Image (cartoon, grey):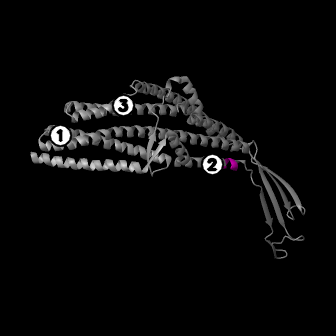
Amino acid sequence: MESLVNVNNICFARYIGIMGLLLTSHFNALAQDSLRLSLAQAEQLFIAQNLSLLAQQYHIDLAKASVIQAKLFNNPTLQFTLNAYNPENRRFFDTGKGTGQYVVDIQQLIRLAGKRNKEVALAETDVMMEESRFFDLLRSLRFSLRSDFYQSYFLQHTLAGYVRQINNLERLHSTYQQLLAKGVVTLKDAARIKTMLYARKAEYTSLQGQLLDVNAELQLLIHNNKAWIIPIIDTTRDSHLGQYALADLLDSAMANRQDLRLAQQSKHYSDQNYALQKAMAIPDLTIGAEFDKRGSSFDNATLLSVAIDLPFFNRNQGNIKAAKLTIAQAKTELEQQQEKVENEVQNAYAKAIQADKLVQAIEPHFMEQLEHLLQSVTDNFQNKNISLLEFVDFYDSYKDNMVQLNQLQNEKMQALEALQFAVGTTIFY
């Protein structure tokens, strides 16, 4: 039995040593390659360097190029026909005065019913839609940035609390191993300290994995995967959420939500397309002039031609019907989007109020008192002023309260960001 215990002690000691090396190397890496950023600085890097935003901007430029194309007039058509071979005088390409023949014809398409202007208006609306898509993408990615920023901040604070406990427990574990060898403490007490240390390091490793994922997302958003990001946040700043009425937030959302604006523009685009399709039912006019040297009833004939399609069969009926149905579809989607925006704002506002109340109910210096007590309880336990049971109970209580407090503060900030995302603009800070 003793040999089994010794083997377990050796294995656990090795595990503790490996974990200690991992923690040390991790924090050394943070010290060497860290990037301390405020939220404003992170947003500046995000707007300047985010690849998704840069790629989306090309869609706007492509739409603007379509406007340029829509404004262009149709080119005239020039045709030159000449005599390839004159059998009477056996001459090739005979265009001479006496016996030659050639025809010069020029034609210009004239678009009627304002088709060109309607196509230009349609292309300009498409530019506005691409701009709305860009700003809606900006809203979504900015929400991800701010959400990950707060998530990273509070995770790092939680991990720092774990590190303080782990450091204390490692010293206690080392002391208890020496006392155990001298027979001063029991194996049960030494094993309890060891178990606490094992549990804290396992929980630390799990949280560290979450932080690594969040940091990777932040690096991607600001296009910098070379540095570990350390968020700088003023947690004492009040959001003043109570001064915002739900009705005002709803009005702000209706005015600022880019996805709602996109739905409105889509409805307008459908109206414009319907007008264009009706105009397409009217045939275009082709006007031409022709010079015929010898092929007409008299030499050197100058002719004028006018051509227009006769809309007996194709009056663009299918496209007109499809455009009309698209208007009804876009109208329904607009109503649905308006209802969605209203529901999102109401839901986010209720959650933000609830999260804010929970954090406001916590005493401002509660965590500072816990930090002070943590060291005090550790010292008193080492001096045998409190029992192991009291020590373990406080350490568990400290850990639970530390984790819960950071979670509550994070949930509050996440709720506020969700409300800003639903409103479509920055309303707090």
Decide if residue 303 is in sight here.
Answer: yes
Say which mark, if any, is on residue 61: 2
Which x, y percent locates residue 72? 73, 50
Residue drawn at x 49%, y 46% as measured from the top left: 221
Whether the residues at callouts 1 and 2 have beta carbons within 8 Å, the answer is no
Q: Which residues are magenta?
A: 65-69
Locate residue 407 relative to residue 105 in the image: left or right.
Answer: left
On the image, numbered disc 1 is attached to which residue?
190
Q: Secondary structure at mark 1?
A: helix
Q: Main secondary structure of the magenta part?
A: helix
Q: Which is more foreground, mark 2 or mark 3?
A: 3
Q: Earlier in the sequence, mark 2 or mark 3?
A: 2
The answer for how far apart the CA atoms under marks 2 and 3 are is 54 Å
Under mark 3, the amino acid is Glu
Decide if residue 198 is in sight here.
Answer: no
Under mark 1, the amino acid is Ala
Residue drawn at x 24%, y 48% as measured from the top left: 15
Single out the residue that lies furthest toward the front: 383
Q: Which is more foreground, mark 1 or mark 2?
A: 1
Locate residue 315 relative to residue 54 in the image: left or right.
Answer: right
How many numbered marks does the figure carry?
Answer: 3
On the image, numbered disc 3 is attached to which residue?
368
Q: Secondary structure at mark 2?
A: helix
Residue drawn at x 61%, y 37% as measured from the top left: 266
Which x, y percent locates residue 327? 61, 35
